[in-house]
Amino acid sequence: MTASSARFSHALFRHAEALLSELLCSVFPADLVVSRYFRQHRELGHADRGFIAETVFLVLRRKRSLSARCADELTSRRLLLAVLACLQGMNRRQLEGVLSESESKWLAQAKAVKIDELPPAVRLDLPDWLYAEFMAQYAADEVERLANGLNQPAPLDLRVNPLKTGRSEVLARLLADGLAAEACRYSPLGIRLLGKPALSKHPLFIDGSIEVQDEGSQLLGFLVQPRRGEMIADFCAGAGGKTLLLGALMRSQGRLYAFDVAERRLARLKPRLARSGLSNVYPLQIESERDVKIRRLAGKLDRVLVDAPCSGLGTLRRNPDLKWRQMPASVAELCAKQAAILAAAGSLVKVGGRLVYATCSLLEAENDAVVQAFLAQHPDFVPCSAQDILARQGIAIDVGERLRLLPHQHGTDAFYAAVMDRR
């Protein structure tokens, strides 16, 4: 019996069914829908919320192969029963009281479906268009490993705030508090937790000693390689995870702009900024990449990070709904936006400065294609080796000129980054 099935109850099944029904017809991201549902049902404890979220997200990850098991009746209820019985290993006795006689017969047939005989895209739980994209970029066996990696839940990574403490001190404190934790493989500031404990009330979180941030995202900050006293911009700052890292690496000296078009995202940065102890961060809402605030800084910045808005397909471990929501047309729109943002960000970089373009996408159209087009139009920018930049900071990782992180190889979300210096 899995940990999830050990917590199973009829009441939790009803909650999971209600939440999954909402998710399958919602136009909003899954994490927002789940958060809203839990706010409406505060009677659910941490373990109960964990079971419900884990179960519905597993359905979203494996929806295509689960649908093949559901035959002609594709309902939230059947998807849940299929995930509990076929993937979580629950038996009829554990499902007794939830399962009707007719459903019991259907479930026996569902468990007998030979997944290995399904078409590859169905078996790997990918939409046809995304499977075709992966096959165009990778060998078939690599696509298999990649898809399996994307279908695993992501671990919980933390980043230590070096202005407050060191990694060894944080590890010792977490272990003393009974939390299983280990140093991340690549990031010098990263800690990986084994499990998903609630951290929002932990003293280390409250005082700003730690932040939640995927290890791959942390490596982007080390590619920027900020120095004290410089002028730097996080061009698409969002809620500011990478902004906080850049500020800490600058030892809170210099000037760090956090640009974003969304006021609500920048609002989420403010409490994190207060906890961090940073005093060199300047959040600025902009109308677009052509905002006058951008033009005033043209040619003045030492370093600019562009974590561009993208399809997010590298984060499917955390956001499995994205693979069913994104379409080739939406990706094409994003590529045009990425090109415009990169050109605007590049205009800020002074001679001798650095530009880092990054996405959490796996698609070449959002990655190399955007960078190559930019370099063709801006010959004063020259590519630099991501591997060499990280090696000079004591980070040993075999990635070559461009950073390409993959979940099945590196244990992180999938990230792409290209470093360009202005000569």
Image (cartoon, rainbow, N blue to C red):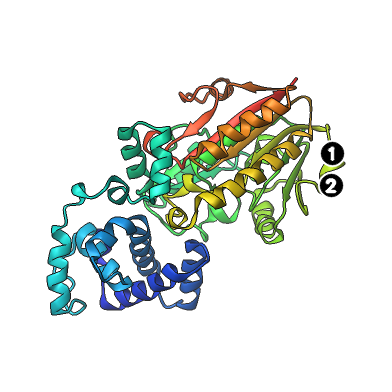
In this view, 418 is above or below 76: above
Q: Does residue 11 sit above or below 184 in this rendering?
A: below
Question: Whole-Å distance between the Cαs marked 1 and 2?
Answer: 7 Å
Q: Quadrant of the C terminus?
A: top right
In depth, the one of 334 and 391 nearer the eye is 334
Q: In terms of secondary structure, where does tag 2 sit?
A: helix
Q: Can the viewer see residue 322 in this picture? A: yes
Where is residue 2 drawn, in percent x and y? 23, 58
Write down the quadrant of residue 7 in the picture.
bottom left
Residue 48 percent across, percent down from the top left: 35, 69
Which quadrant would residue 380 be assigned to in this image?
A: top right
Position of residue 348 in the picture relative to residue 408 (left or right): right
Asked whether the beta carbons under mark 1 and mark 2 sit within 8 Å of each other, the answer is yes
Please give the name of the residue rendered at 18% of the width and 80% of the height, measured from the top-left corner. Answer: 97
Q: Residue at x 13, y 58 (%)?
A: 112
Q: How many marks?
A: 2
- Residue 293's mark? 2
Inspect the image, locate mark 1, and give the three-letter code of the amino acid beneath it. Leu
Asked if residue 131 is positioned above or below residue 138 in the image, the reply reads below
Query: What element does badge 1 sit on?
Result: loop
Q: Nearer the viewer, residue 89 or 5?
A: 89
Any part of residue 241 in sight: no
Q: Of residues 304 and 2, which is closer to you in this image?
A: 304
Viewport quadrant of the N terminus: bottom left
For residue 297, the mark is 1
Q: Is residue 240 left or right of residue 125?
A: right
- Where is residue 200 shown, x and y percent of the image? 52, 59
